[in-house]
């Protein structure tokens, strides 16, 4: 895989740049611009090299049809402001655009094509559609790591027709994930949350031989607490997960990896309820486990202090309610404290984890925060991502 930074002559070259600008929109306004902000270095680099940039991206799931509410127009305006550049949004049918339609004058540096998922050929990884895209440019750059677990035309097939490179953000994502999966500085700890243990089982199985500690929190931990013979009341749980937990525990013994789950918890009668700290065997039938307790926070803090590398995916509780955010906040604060004193290398990923760190204004306090959801998780599972395979 070759980075666009390695290409020496980009002067006036047309760059077909695949980005992930799939940001949340409400009433035509962007509610979280993290993904946009992260790709600005690539755009600024290409502009500094006097390249001509053709942005392709998607928003939402229009399922191959034009959906006006999923236009890239608000994102185009946001980028114009952040780059101090005029950006033309070209709404013309991609299959009718020819290269000469683009960059009518020398002042034009950036053009954006409309939502690539307005075309059914994109998600079908259609070869002809990819070839048409390739006729618009001299070079292809993938800076959409978070889409690279999808074998789509603008991620996969297009690389067959143009010299293809990774973008700066793509490089950062892959390098950060390499550091926690292959270039490991031990001891290494994974803090993993989420609601369903079945969706993370392959990640846990892949990480057990490489990691020293796997700390399971959030809804996933409820299944383990129940497996250990405790009542979990109305807590979020997954049916038929006992065999998965048994498999994880057996693997951890052979892999010399400690599995840590909560020692105490915080409960409420509902998601808006008042918090109450309890031991694992004290949960009543009308209560929900919604956070980790102080004993668990102390255990996790001590493990972070003993670690050189931390991977965090998934909050410790229902952080959307401040009453049940303490566990997640304390984990974040402990990682940040050790990060600032250069004791650890820290990587965080997953939508809820990013939302939490955004709410704490702590995105920049980690070595790397990934906005890639599915691609991040599939890489951790050990899967080969179509986007990486295509660039290789």
Image: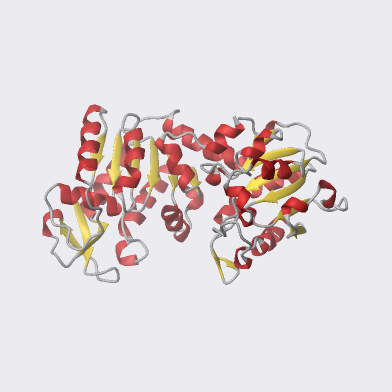
Q: How far across and down, in percent of the image, does residue 6 sit?
A: 69, 31
Residue 342 in sight: no
Decide which of 335, 134 is in the foreground and name it.
Answer: 134
Give the image quarter of residue 387: top right
**Image coords of residue 392 (percent x, y):** 59, 29
Tell me which residue sits at (21%, 41%) in the image: 243
Asked if one can make out residue 75 in the rendered structure from this viewpoint, the answer is: yes
The residue lying toward the viewer, choosing from 127 and 177, is 127
Return the x and y of residue 333 as percentages of the image width and height: 38, 52
Q: Quadrant of the N terminus?
A: top right
Picture layout, residue 5 above or below residue 335: above
Q: In which quarter of the image is residue 181?
A: top left
Based on the displayed image, in which of its 4 quarters is residue 2 positioned? Answer: top right
| Residue at position x 61%, y 33% in the image | 391
Which residue shows up at 60% across the image and 67% down it?
Answer: 69
Name the side, left or right, on which 386 lies relative to 185. right
Query: Quick one: which residue is furthest to the right in this view?
Result: 105
């Amino acid at each position: 895989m070759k980075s666009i930074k390695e290409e020496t002559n980009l002067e006036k070259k047309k760059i077909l740049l695949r980005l992930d600008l799939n940001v949340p929109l409400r009433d035509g306004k962007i509610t979280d611009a993290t993904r946009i902000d992260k790709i600005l270095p690539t755009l600024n680099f290409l502009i500094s090299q006097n390249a001509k940039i053709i942005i392709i991206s998607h928003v939402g799931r229009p399922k191959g049809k034009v959906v006006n509410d999923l236009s890239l127009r608000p994102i185009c305006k946001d980028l114009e402001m952040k780059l101090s550049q005029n950006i033309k949004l070209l709404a013309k049918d991609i299959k009718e655009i020819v290269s000469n339609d683009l960059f009518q004058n020398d002042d034009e540096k950036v053009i954006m094509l409309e939502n690539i998922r307005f075309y059914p050929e994109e998600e079908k990884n259609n070869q002809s559609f990819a070839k048409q895209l390739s006729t618009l440019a001299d070079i292809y750059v993938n800076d959409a790591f978070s889409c690279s677990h999808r074998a789509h035309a603008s991620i996969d097939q297009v690389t067959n027709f143009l010299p293809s490179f990774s973008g700066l953000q793509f490089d950062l994502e892959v390098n950060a994930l390499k550091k926690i999966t292959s270039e490991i500085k031990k001891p290494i700890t994974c803090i993993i949350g989420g609601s369903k243990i079945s969706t993370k089982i392959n990640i846990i199985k892949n990480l057990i031989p490489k990691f020293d500690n796997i700390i399971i929190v959030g809804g996933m931990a409820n299944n383990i607490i129940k497996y250990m013979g405790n009542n979990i009341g109305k807590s979020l749980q997954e049916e038929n997960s006992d065999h998965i937990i048994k498999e994880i525990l057996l693997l951890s013994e052979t892999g010399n990896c400690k599995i840590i789950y909560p020692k105490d918890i915080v409960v409420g009668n509902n998601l808006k309820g008042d918090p109450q700290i309890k031991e694992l065997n004290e949960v009543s039938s009308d209560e929900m486990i919604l956070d980790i307790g102080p004993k668990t926070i102390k255990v996790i803090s001590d493990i972070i202090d003993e670690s050189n590398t931390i991977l965090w995916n998934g909050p410790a509780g229902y952080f959307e309610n401040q009453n049940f955010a303490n566990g997640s906040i304390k984990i974040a604060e402990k990682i940040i404290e050790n990060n600032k004193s250069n004791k650890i290398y820290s990587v965080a990923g997953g939508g809820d984890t990013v939302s939490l760190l955004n709410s704490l204004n702590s995105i920049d306090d980690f070595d790397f925060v990934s906005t890639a959801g599915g691609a991040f998780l599939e890489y951790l599972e050990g899967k080969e991502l179509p986007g990486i395979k295509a660039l290789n």
